[in-house]
Structure formats: structure tokens, C-alpha cells
Amino acid sequence: EPEVTQTPSHQVTQMGQEVILRCVPISNHLYFYWYRQILGQKVEFLVSFYNNEISEKSEIFDDQFSVERPDGSNFTLKIRSTKLEDSAMYFCASRDNRGNTIYFGEGSWLTVV
Amino acid sequence: AQSVTQLDSHVSVSEGTPVLLRCNYSSSYSPSLFWYVQHPNKGLQLLLKYTSAATLVKGINGFEAEFKKSETSFHLTKPSAHMSDAAEYFCVVSAQIGNEKLTFGTGTRLTIIP
């Protein structure tokens, strides 16, 4: 069964460093998302991406965050200058253009120290 | 605007007994509703979804949920719990019209007692 894959599974970074989280969505999907889950809190929407541009973003998704689809398969989330409060599990997700089922990857744990 | 309330943060049941995880939603539009499960150190897996077709929805691993518009509820049930059902369960809502964003509940941790 096709799945969304994410790398790395876990990353530790120093405060102020740039981080790039990578995702390979399901191959025929056209809509891409990032969500995050701070330990002990709700899963929160960050951003949705379609047709090579952001279609919606939350208040969390400030200027420190950016997304990119650099080629036909990868979808990346960049955090320019990480803060301690960016420590969370980041989930990539995707869906096709017919259904409304969103499929999630296994997540990337980001720990900022 | 849309929101989800999961009424229990933690549910414990004995193996072989029924499971009931409660969820109430609020949505300005006719919503799509989902249950996702997260096993320890794993990602979010779709259990089942409601998208304005049949109100009783069957999912994987013997789970099902009933959409009740009059009660704005979408409770998750299973007739007989298995040890492998121990996980965190999230009720999720999305508005069907022009909004792909999913809104998650706070989650219910299901513990199965041997």
C-alpha cells in the first residue's frame, strides 16, 4: 500500500540552527500538508500546499517556516532559526484530488536544545 | 469554524469487552469526520471516515462509528477489545467546503486490561 514517508525520523538541533524536514508524499497525490504535535498537546495544522503554492497556513506558520516542493517527489518543511518551542513531532500528509482522505507519514521528531 | 471535543482523555477496558470512545463536533458546514489512531512511536493511521454517505461507518480492525447529526456526535465503538487496540485515538473534523484543514481533538488514550 502506498504511504507517505518522512526523514529524518528524529533530529536534535541547537537553538538558532536551520532544520529541513523531508517528506515523500504518495505519488499521485496533489495536496500536501504539514501538521505538528507538541508533546502532550493536540495535533495542529501548519500549512497546506497545492499547485506549487501555499493554499492555507495557520498562525503558527510564521516567517520562520517555509515549504517547498523542489522536485516531483519531495515536499520539505524548513525552519530557519529554530526555537526551543519548535520541539515537536512534525507530520507530513497528502491526499489526491478526488477524495478527502488525508494520509499521514510516521512523523519526524524534532528536539531543539 | 469547526471544533472537536473528545470527552474522555483516558479510557480503560478489559480485553474482550466493548470499547466506546466519545466525540462531539461543531462545524459551520456539513462536516467530514474521521478517526485516526496513533500507536506508540508510530504515525497517524486512518481508522474510518464519514463523508455524508451512510451514517454508520465501518473501519479497520473491527471499529465503527455512527454519525448523529441531531447529537453532533461521532462516537467510535468496537464490540470486543483486543490488546493490540491500545493506542491514542483522535477524532478529527474537516469542513467539506473550501477548507482542507483538519481539526483534531485532544485524543483519547485507550488502555486494554488483560
Image: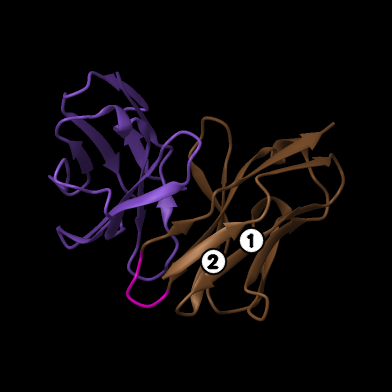
Chain colours: A purple, B brown
Q: Amino acid at mark 1?
A: Cys
| Residue B33, disc | 2
The answer to whether residue A34 is left or right of residue A16 is right
Label 2 with label 1: CB-CB less than 8 Å: yes
At 29% from the left edge and 18% from the top edge, which residue is drawn? Answer: A113
State the image coordinates of residue A64 (x, y, percent, origin top left). 16, 40
Main secondary structure of the magenta stretch: loop
| Residue A91, disc | none
Q: Nearer the viewer, residue B109 or A76?
A: B109
Tell me the SS state at disc 1.
strand
For the record, the magenta segment spans B96-100
Q: Amino acid at mark 2?
A: Leu
Q: Nearer the viewer, residue A100 or A19?
A: A19
Q: In the rendered structure, the residue with mark 2 lies on which chain? A: B
Tell me the SS state at disc 2.
strand
At 29% from the left edge and 40% from the top edge, which residue is drawn? Answer: A23
Q: Mark yes or no: residue A11 visible.
A: yes
Residue receiving disc 1: B23
At 37% from the left edge and 71% from the top edge, which residue is drawn? Answer: A98
**Quarter of the image where the C terminus of chain B is located:** top right
Q: Tell me if residue B60 comes above or below residue A80 in the rendering.
A: below
State the image coordinates of residue A58 (x, y, percent, origin top left). 28, 55
State the image coordinates of residue B94 (x, y, percent, origin top left). 44, 67
Residue B105 is a magenta residue = no
